[in-house]
Image: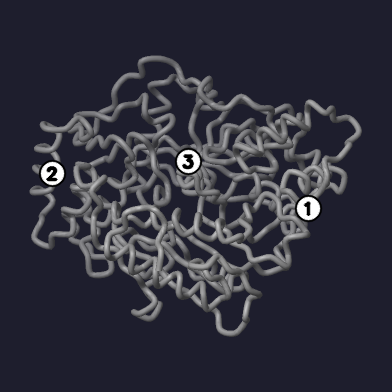
Amino acid sequence: MTLPAVTYSDDQAAAFDSVTEMLRSAGIDLEDSLLMPSPGGADQVMAVTGKAGSGKTLLLAELYKALEGAGVDVVSGDYESRKRREKRTLAILAPTNKAASVLRLRGVPATTIHRILYTPVYDPEYERIAEWLAGAGERPEIEGLTELALDRAAAFYAGNKSIPGALAAAGLRGSDFITGWKRREEPLDIGFVDESSMLDDKQYEDLREIFPTLLLFGDPAQLAPVNQSGTMVFEKLPEQRVLDLSRVHRQDADNPILDLAHALGDPDLGFEDFERMIEDFARKDDRVVWGSRVEVDLMARSPVLVWRNATRIRLINAFRSVHGAPDDALLAGEPLICDGIELPLKHRKKRLDLEARGLIKGAQVIYLGEGRKPGFSRLHVIGAEDPQVSAASIVKIEKPDEEEPFIPFAARMGATFLHGAAVTIHKAQGSQWETVQVFAPDLYAAARMGRLEAGQPLWKRLAYVAITRAQERLIWVVRNRLSKPTGPLMIDDLKATPAAPLTLDAPDEI
């Protein structure tokens, strides 16, 4: 068959052919660009696995281009035309906003699993704009919106393919055009899931209900979800349904960060040998740094990666101390990690509102300042398409040797947050940062304990995940010291758009 105009390795070409055959049996012929109604019958699941640098993302991107070229509609999660329902559809998913944003930066229109499970309900008036932008309707006339505003919306959509972003460019807020969220009732066709090593069994079953054809992309060397007993969902598939990519590609072959990650596969490599390897790499290549201290300036945007919670809490308090943060308030620019939503069942719609805006467990957030109402915070959600939001917040600052966290201020219910200047390596999965600091004393402690996970030394799995979070630069921090900040915390680098409020209806519940 004719492959897209890229140079594939043998294992990528074989994987492409296997996926193409699976799609053909589902009624989508990529070779002749033919789309037929879904034949129904047995669901199909396949996995593409491989370590960092093996070309999983390239294969995902090329399969997406081939499907789009064949006429398959890509469902983004932010809007789905009613006129699409008879068409063949594809959704490209990641477990977190940060992981989805990594794909979007590469031109792949990814969204979160949550945004596919729960779909937005649009105000009928503004839905006419969405239909027009999506190519399913005529240019509308909307009271209160000028022709220039519609032109701005069209120009934005042409470059970004985001309906909410286009409506925001026209001067609207999310609360103007999205009236609520509902659990998806209509199934889709094909789902691509990146970072599928992070999926737990419940998420996997939810996806199986929606997608009769599901393709998982994952790295078996990463850490399994905490509640999965060291097992990833694709490891339960039949062997013939798992396509393994084993070659590291030329563009990645001279990357010292990936070289270090792959060196961890040597069963005879000990921790001390690995550190000597890092020290040697650091002398030859400035993309690897042997760090004598934690660089505090990086912590506001790129958390220090640790294994132990005690280390995480100690580093967070040191970060706040050197910035002069008071005990009873947050400073604008402090990083937070969403720890979930604390709302009673009767506020299910508000929970969906918060989660749909990206405030899902594990989301990285920057605090921008107090909201207009007590207990509300203005927040920037890293990786979200519409990143700025005002929400009822419960912020918890954990203290060393104290069982209960200190809460500087809080709403009575809403999104809960932990500080994000340091995070555990488990929680960092699915995210990448330009520069990553790994706190080596924690990994040394894991090596000394001799723990195994899925037959591998735990310290090696931790080191592999931590190292591969770095896109450009790895700092291996070997001492428990913190530098002084070169200046105050800043928020000027964040996208300056109005924050759309998410409020509770009943005033006694704010």
Q: Which residue is mark 1?
A: 121
| First in residue order: circle 2 vs circle 1 | 1
Q: Nearer the viewer, residue 377 or 42?
A: 42
**Left or right: residue 421 compared with residue 75:** left
211 is higher (above) or lower (below) than 155: below
Q: Which residue is mark 2?
A: 275
Tell me which corner region of the image, top left, top right, bottom left or bottom right, holds residue 227. Answer: bottom left
Tell me which corner region of the image, top left, top right, bottom left or bottom right, holds residue 305. Answer: top left
Q: Which residue is mark 3?
A: 105
Q: Position of residue 427 (x, y in %)?
A: 42, 50
Q: Mark 3 against mark 2, which lies toward the viewer?
A: 3
Q: CA distance from mark 3 to mark 1?
A: 27 Å
Three-letter residue code for mark 3 = Leu
Three-letter residue code for mark 2 = Glu
| First in residue order: circle 3 vs circle 2 | 3
Point 60% across, 33% down: residue: 379
Q: Position of residue 70 (x, y in %)?
A: 57, 61
Q: Nearer the viewer, residue 287 or 48?
A: 48
**Left or right: residue 161 compared with residue 17:** right
Three-letter residue code for mark 1 = Val
| Quarter of the C terminus within the rendering | top right
Disc 3: CA contacts within 10 A as few (<14), some (14-19) or many (>=20): few
Asked if one can make out residue 405 in the rendered structure from this viewpoint, the answer is no
Q: CA distance from mark 2 to mark 1?
A: 53 Å
User: Do the CB atoms of the residues marked 3 and 1 lie less than 8 Å apart?
Assistant: no
